Amino acid sequence: MKANERGILSSYDLKKPSVRWGYILMYLIIAVMMCCMVYPILISMLNGFKLNKEVNSFPPTFWPNEWHFENYTKAWNYIDLPFYFKNTMFVFFGNMIITVLVLGLAAYALSKMLVPFKSAIYYYFLMTLFIPATTYMIPSFINLKDLGLMGSFAAVWLPAGANAFFLLLLKTFIDGIHVEIFESARIDGASEWRAFFQIAFPLSIPIFATLAIFVFATAWNDWFWPSFILSQDNKPLSVAIRDFVLNARRLDMNIKFAILTLVMIPPIILFLFFQKFILRGLYLGGVKG
Amino acid sequence: MEQTPAVPVVNAKPQKQRSRKLNRYMWGLLFLLPAIVTFTLFLWLPIFKGVLNSFYNVDFVKGNTFIGFDNYRTIFSDGVVLIAVKNTLYYMGLALVIGFWVPIFFALAISEMRRFQGFARVAAYLPYVVPFVVLYGVWRWLYDPIGPINAALGKIGIDQINFISDRSWSMISIVIMETWQSFGSAMLIYLAAVLSVPRDWYEAAEIDGAGIWQRIRHITLPAISGQIILLLMLQLISTSQGFQTHFAMLDGGPNNATLTYALHIVKYAFVRIDYGVASALGVLMFFVLSILAVIQYRINNKGGTNL
């Protein structure tokens, strides 16, 4: 083993029996951790195949005694999943368009254009990062009501443009693009509009892709806020699951698990496919947590 | 960042230059306008309305009436607020004791893996992509008196634990669940930091006779201390505002055992329909949390980590 292939431990350390046992123990602990991580996800998938009686039996079984594939058909038909899925996608695409148009343009202007009182405007945006969202959660709700947006998708879309953290990420990225590109475009007669859409936006695709991951995760996961501000017809999937599945009184456990499985599979598949991009985005987003 | 044009306009008359500059100013402002409007309407307006509403009795039908400090008086005479503050502090403390070391420990352990490192990373992060609503459903069953955790405990001879309905366990159950769900992302941040420590340092330390623990204590931990402090602050900021899991899993119960401060705000607003008191609670919370936020900002800037 080459010298640079070591970690904290070297291959010399591993020859000592005490270290070796510790190393094996460490692998074991990691294996246990991995099982704990995967078990709840696997068991919900498998519970979806069991008879309701088997799910409620004690002690619980891992593999189903008989495979009941029809549970998933029942689960699919229990609530109108495609309808709520459509709403979730509406939230996602709307938020994304607003992010590009509002925050993208603003970040570009702050980074590459002449603006009077630039730093004052920048601080006007960034100051909002210091005010925890929970403290003005209720006033936001009243505010949306006052503005007459309550219930419509606009109540989710428009506030998506007020995200100082995304603005910060975008501006930092656009700062890294050489200013000469824009100068030569301007000399060639390109309008600022074209400079943004034909140069700045295509060059910033990596950061927009990262933001798209965040926005998607929010659209798919967020249930609390949408449950208060979106009307029945505009409910996203997460809210529908909470209202009709989690809080349902007369729903068999096996069907419940089948529905939950159907809802968690798309993001898991997306994650496994786009792992590299998602994890890279995580390091950027890590600052915000 | 100020950017000056690379090619100055040399021959143009001053007047023309000024109008061009005005033109450029106009475009810049035009590009910023949507953001200024949304930030004003959806962030600053609610923030100021919150302060304002805390002095009013908010009524959507009859209109607001000014009542001075009555909302604040209500809060200080409400004994449940004290319980909520205690619960929030307890929750923050538990999240540190149960959750904070887990990602550091696994980042160190996984960085030492010579094989299957990728699998371990993916497995640790996997729960993070499962939607919250699904987790609530799954964990309610896992924590059930006849669920798998109690079955496993029964096998090693431990009596049944009512994770959800036992007052002394309910908060711990929530913290365990949240740690399980979210430690993966913190772990990956630590892991990146641990892996970026130059290997030669360990080599040199080993030659000088440093043991394994000494290497971790004197090389690895100092190298990731920036991330540790950063994530500590972020965890404190997020747990001090935590309420969604408490709300969805237990609705603040049993008997207010998981009623956090933020959840109390939500309850004042949407159960008692008293938006004035809810706004006042938010204002009080702001004063406490802004201290945390400022500390985090200073650390962030001093350490120069990331952004």
Image (cartoon, rainbow, N blue to C red):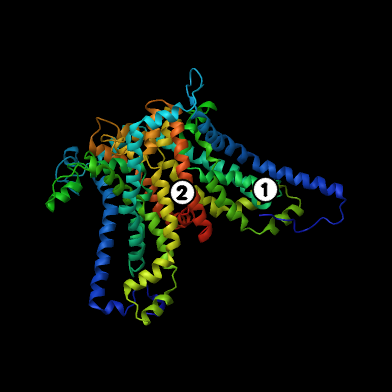
The residue wearing badge 2 is B292
At 61% from the left and 48% from the top, the residue drawn is A107
Disc 1 with disc 2 on a shared chain: no
Classify A97 as above or below A146: below
State the residue in front, A256 or A280.
A280
Q: Chain of mark 1?
A: A
Quarter of the image that includes the C terminus of chain B: bottom right
Q: Nearer the viewer, mark 1 or mark 2?
A: 2
Residue type, mark 2 in image: Leu
Q: Is residue A203 visible?
A: no
Q: Which label sits on residue A118? A: 1
Is label 1 in a helix, a strand or a loop? helix
Alpha carbons under labels 1 and 2: distance apart: 28 Å
Q: Is residue A218 visible?
A: yes
Is label 2 in a helix, a strand or a loop? helix
Relative side of A65 to B136, left or right: left
Quarter of the image that includes the N terminus of chain B: bottom right
